[in-house]
């Protein structure tokens, strides 16, 4: 299946990525090659097969929903590009 | 006498515990080795010189603790594992300034066992790659031939351990990122069973595939590291309650391979192997036979589909996992944009490298409305079939054996322009991550034509690391000893 530059731009937009005009064409070609390769999966009959999303075999463990203090506000905030110590600061939303 | 940097983990640990070797002495020797080799191989992103020396002096003053199996041992950690107060960049501009306030569980366990972190190692950005060439910061070279790649994505850790910078390092394996670089650099690498080692603090790429594991220069050394990092962790619900056996004790239980059935998947031993890989791996099979193992032909019929299923799943998971990098709570932010949505676009487009963007776009595509069933669900169905193939083969055999990669380490730059060709270099390592089963890459010798190291992989049943280590240990004893890599010992 041929992926067009427009489709790449549309998908990239969904992922909040902006791909430059020069790269769009390149990406479109590479994505086409890669997805063409993926078509090999259509040779496999999976009509009777349940999908396997995780290899985990044990039951998911449950625990009490207890509040715990594991880190300080300073620790959580210290990697923020901008904060006032109380809140993460972002550019205006609208 | 062996130089300190040449010591195995087992020997160094013994000497540290008996105080024949001081911790500061060991740390200094490793730092010197790093200084001597880094100009040639460039595997480190961040050095913790002063903290490590300080810690070493404190430990020397306090004296050895026999309860700590890695007491005083210097280690290198792949930069995808969070290290408290030490930068953790994932090889990405996006996290260039990120300094975690906590340790990954695997790192914490190493520290509690007495290990000292000396450095963080280079990697493909967010572990996406097979050559470490996708790092935003450094070019890592193979210590055997500095014109070639060390493999990836844990290429920094593999090259570091192979070059003797420290006796061990940690890496992570999502689709072969421990086993393939271990093979390319001539060291032992283990991808444990999914759930054997906690993923807490391992920056997520493909959450249903990622596992952390050790690089070392011998099977025994690797077993000692796995012993420390394996086990249930309440902070990772996918970590398994399965008890951790005594791996070191298991090594002493065998001195031959009598009664062991080793399956040879026909899909891995056919055409397409480079002659050095074919020759060295087949001579290892011959040794296994001489040691008493029975070689059994087996088939993993869905192997030709595994790599496509793998890339669909890993890209889908990556696109979801990497949605968190939005320039708000941590990491890079583009400050030129004055509106929130524009800031997201600018941050992500400038913070992520090309390959990461490519995988996010592909992952978003396969998860998007109208394509979800055709790609993502289909891949997950094929994933089950791939796992059933392996389980069936392992019912009849103790372990499976295969080359770690179809070829020797490729040249720097050889595959960077063609992502699909790069993906196909993982053809022998990807399927195992789909199954969750454990694998070990063992140096099988140097190729007679290229003089480059060749790795043999062993696959085992779920939580079968004990058997994997046992068989690898016996086989290692019969295989040629690798010298130190010539690229760094001119």
Image (spheres, rainbow, N blue to C red):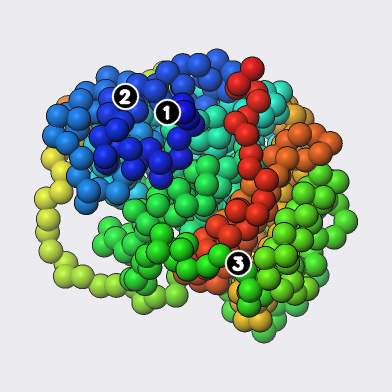
What chain is tagged by disc 2? B
| Residue at figure coordinates x 39%, y 23% from the top left | B29
Give the alpha-carbon distance from disc 2 to disc 3, as whole Å: 38 Å
> Which chain is disc 3 placed on?
B
Q: In the depicted view, which residue is nearer to us: B18 or B284? A: B18
Whether residue B364 is visible here, answered yes or no, is: no
Q: Is residue B371 left or right of residue B273?
A: left
Q: Whole-percent x and y of residue B397?
A: 65, 77
How many residues crowd around disc 1 within 10 Å: few (fewer than 14), some, or many (20 or more)? many
Pinpoint residue B235: horizontal percent, then vertical percent.
Answer: 28, 58
How many numbered marks, from 0 up? 3
Q: Which residue is mark 1?
A: B4
Check disc 2 and report the residue beneath it: B25
Helix, strand or loop under label 1: helix
Q: Nearer the viewer, residue B331 or B406?
A: B406
Q: Give the foreground label among 2 and 3.
A: 3
Tag 1 near tag 2, CB within 8 Å: yes
- Say which element carries label 2: helix
Q: Residue at x 44, y 54 (%)?
A: B223
The answer as to whether the residues below labels 2 and 3 share one chain is yes
Q: Position of residue B41 (x, y in %)?
A: 58, 23
The residue sitting at 54% across, 29% down in the picture is B163
Q: Residue furthest bottom?
A: A48
Find residue B227 and report its horizontal and vertical position in percent. Answer: 37, 57
Check disc 3 and report the residue beneath it. Answer: B256
Q: Say few, some or many: other residues with alpha carbon within 10 Å of mark 3 (under 14 / 14 to 19 / 20 or more).
A: many
Q: Which badge, 2 or 3, comes first in the chain's sequence?
A: 2
């Amino acid at each position: 299946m041929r992926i067009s530059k427009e489709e790449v731009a549309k998908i990239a937009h969904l992922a909040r990525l902006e791909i430059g005009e020069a790269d769009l064409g390149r990406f479109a070609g590479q994505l086409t090659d890669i997805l063409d390769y993926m078509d090999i999966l259509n040779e496999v009959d999976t009509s009777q097969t349940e999908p396997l999303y995780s290899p985990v075999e044990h039951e998911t463990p449950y625990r009490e929903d207890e509040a715990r203090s594991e880190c300080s506000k300073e620790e959580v905030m210290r990697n923020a590009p901008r904060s006032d110590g109380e809140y993460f600061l972002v550019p205006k939303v609208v | 006498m062996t130089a300190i940097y040449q010591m195995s983990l087992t020997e160094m640990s013994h000497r540290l515990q008996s105080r024949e070797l001081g911790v500061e002495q060991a740390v200094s020797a490793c730092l010197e080795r790093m200084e001597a080799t880094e100009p040639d191989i460039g595997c480190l992103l961040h050095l913790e010189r002063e903290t490590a020396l300080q810690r070493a002096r404190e430990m020397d003053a306090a004296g050895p603790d026999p309860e700590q199996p890695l007491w005083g041992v210097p280690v290198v950690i792949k930069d995808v594992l969070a290290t408290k107060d030490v930068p953790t960049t994932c090889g990405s501009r996006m996290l260039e300034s990120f300094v975690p306030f906590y340790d990954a569980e695997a790192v914490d366990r190493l520290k509690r066992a007495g290990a000292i972190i000396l450095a963080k190692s280079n990697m493909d950005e967010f572990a996406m790659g097979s050559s470490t060439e996708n790092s935003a910061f450094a070019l890592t070279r193979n210590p055997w031939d500095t014109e070639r790649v060390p493999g990836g994505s844990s290429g920094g850790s593999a090259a570091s351990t192979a070059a003797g910078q420290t006796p061990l390092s940690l890496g992570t394996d999502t689709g072969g990122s421990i086993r393939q670089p271990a093979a390319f650099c001539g060291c032992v690498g283990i991808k444990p069973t999914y759930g054997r080692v906690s993923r807490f603090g391992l920056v997520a790429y493909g959450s249903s595939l990622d596992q952390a594991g050790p690089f070392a220069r011998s099977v025994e050394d690797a077993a000692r590291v796995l012993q420390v990092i394996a086990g249930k962790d309440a902070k990772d619900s996918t970590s398994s309650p399965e008890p951790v056996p005594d791996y070191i004790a298991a090594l002493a239980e065998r001195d031959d391979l009598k009664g062991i059935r080793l399956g040879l998947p026909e899909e891995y031993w056919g055409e397409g192997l480079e002659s050095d890989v074919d020759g060295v791996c087949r001579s290892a099979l011959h040794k296994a036979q001489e040691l008493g193992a029975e070689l059994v032909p087996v088939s993993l019929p869905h192997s030709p589909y595994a790599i496509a299923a793998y890339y669909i799943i890993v890209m889908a998971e990556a696109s979801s996992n990497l949605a968190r990098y939005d320039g708000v709570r941590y990491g890079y932010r583009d400050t030129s944009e004055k509106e929130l949505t524009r800031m997201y676009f600018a941050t992500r487009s400038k913070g992520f490298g090309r390959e990461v963007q490519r995988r996010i776009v592909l992952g978003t595509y396969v998860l998007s409305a109208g394509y979800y069933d055709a790609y993502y669900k289909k891949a997950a169905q094929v994933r089950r079939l791939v796992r059933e193939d392996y389980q069936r083969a392992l019912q009849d055999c103790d372990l499976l054996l295969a080359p770690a990669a179809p070829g020797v380490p490729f040249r720097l730059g050889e595959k960077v322009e063609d992502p699909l060709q790069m993906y196909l270099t993982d053809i022998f390592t990807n399927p195992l991550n789909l199954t969750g089963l454990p694998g070990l890459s063992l140096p099988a010798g140097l190729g007679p034509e290229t003089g480059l190291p060749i790795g043999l992989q062993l696959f085992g049943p779920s939580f079968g690391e004990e058997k994997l280590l046992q068989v690898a240990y016996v086989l290692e004893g019969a295989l040629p000893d690798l010298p130190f890599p010539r690229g760094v010992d001119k």
